Image (spheres, grey):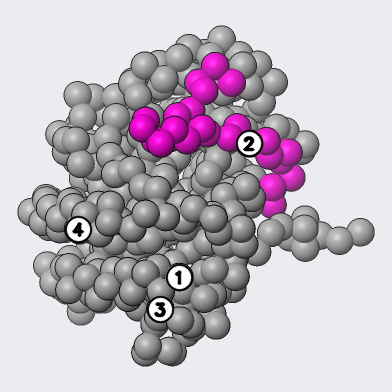
Amino acid sequence: MDSRAAGVRGNLTRQLANAAMGRSDVISLWFGEPDVATPDFIRQAAIDSLNQGETFYTEGLGRMFLREALSSYLRKLHSAGPSPERIAVTVSGGNAINLAFQCVLREGDQVVTPTPAFPNLQSIPALQGAQVQTVPMHYGPQIGWQLDINRLVEACATARAVLVNSPSNPTGWVQSRDDQLALLAASRRYGTWIISDEVYSRIYFDGPVAPSWVEIAEPEDRVLIVNSFSKAWAMTGWRLGWLTAPTSLMPTLERIIEFSISSAPAFTQRAATQALTDGEPFIAESVARYRHNLDTIEEVFAGVPQIRFLRPPATFYAFFEVEGVRDNLDYAARMMNEAGVGLAPGTTFDPHAHSWFRLCFAQSPARLQSALQRLQDFWQAE
Ligand SMILES: Cc1ncc(COP(=O)(O)O)c(C=O)c1O
């Protein structure tokens, strides 16, 4: 019998991007990361830490100074927040998702999650033996992406865990507080675990932070909250994140961290602490740049008749439809080869999104302008 890993779907965007690696003629907008390096003040904290010889194992749940910094960062940002004891430092958001599922899944359990979605959100529980079921979101040209919350609430009766990614990659959809409360009530009623992936919580255009489960979950609610330093502080290559869990789960979490990563590196934890303490101006500047880029995209797309696009309230992704496209893999390959622009095909996120594409606009305005000009020329010539 094949291993579970043999049955897990590969990432379609990765396959395309591999073909373009090293090609200077392609402007790549397929991956979800800012095109700027991590700010100097964050890098310097890591350099200082290394120079001081902080090269040893650390505590399994992370350095207490970082867990305390995370707790006070969250409490400042939200009306409430977890104590440091309920926060585990992880080596990335992806690692936090893996740990969250390892903590709660039993063999054959059902996990339910909305789509379109970042593909890892289905692959990670599948790799751990879960039966993953999806709840498709609906798209209306005037209202954007909508989730039928009743379907998720109903799913709580049988599912072991519900995974929600808000703000969502790729759609930018944001879950409302009312929907969160409905789901929390269902979790309390049925004992279902809620895993909330909030890695884009700071890339939000309607306020300092998107509605978070941090604000509503009590310390013993069955809620696990995933976050990451990757997106908001431009630290994708550092591999650092955190997981907020109920108090009673922390000993389990500590045990299983020992079996995989043992502990996050000391010097990256110093850098992360600096990011939390001094990073607000960087986040504000980044969000202002993304808002400006979104204005540009909206303007350009409005002039292309075959494009359907609605401005998202969060994230640095434009998820849009090109009317008439049937095979988005072939079309993405053509955009790469003929226009010189790399976009992620929609079927990476949803097997039915054959005419959809995701563009990451965490770019310098000049780079984005060049990419949009190339796309406009390509669409005009069609
Ligand atoms: C929705 C979502 N969750 C988690 C991650 C993982 O982020 P990282 O592992 O870099 O912290 C990503 C990265 O693209 C993402 O889009």
Q: Nearer the viewer, mark 3 or mark 1?
A: 1
C-alpha gap between disc 3 and disc 4: 19 Å
Q: Looking at the image, which residue is at 55% across and 59% down? A: 325
- Which quadrant would the N terminus be assigned to in this image? bottom right
Left or right of 178? Residue 73 is left
Sequence-first tag of 3 and 2: 2
Q: Looking at the image, which residue is at 13% across and 72% down? A: 40
Instruction: Assess whether mark 4 and mark 3 are in contact (beta carbons under 8 angstroms).
Output: no
Which residue is identified by label 4? 296
The one nearer the camera, 160 or 121, is 121
Q: Amino acid at mark 2?
A: Thr
Q: Amino acid at mark 3?
A: Ala
Question: Is residue 145 part of the magenta span, yes or no?
Answer: yes
Q: Which mark is residue 58?
A: none
- Which quadrant would the C terminus be assigned to in this image? bottom left
C-alpha gap between disc 3 and disc 2: 34 Å
The one nearer the camera, 48 or 289, is 289
Q: Looking at the image, which residue is at 69% across and 21% down? A: 158
C-alpha gap between disc 2 and disc 1: 35 Å
Q: Amino acid at mark 1?
A: Glu
Q: Nearer the viewer, mark 4 or mark 1?
A: 1
C-alpha gap between disc 4 and disc 2: 33 Å
Which residue is identified by label 2? 134
C-alpha gap between disc 4 and disc 1: 22 Å
Question: Is residue 131 part of the magenta span, yes or no?
Answer: yes
Q: Which mark is residue 339?
A: 3
Sequence-first tag of 3 and 4: 4
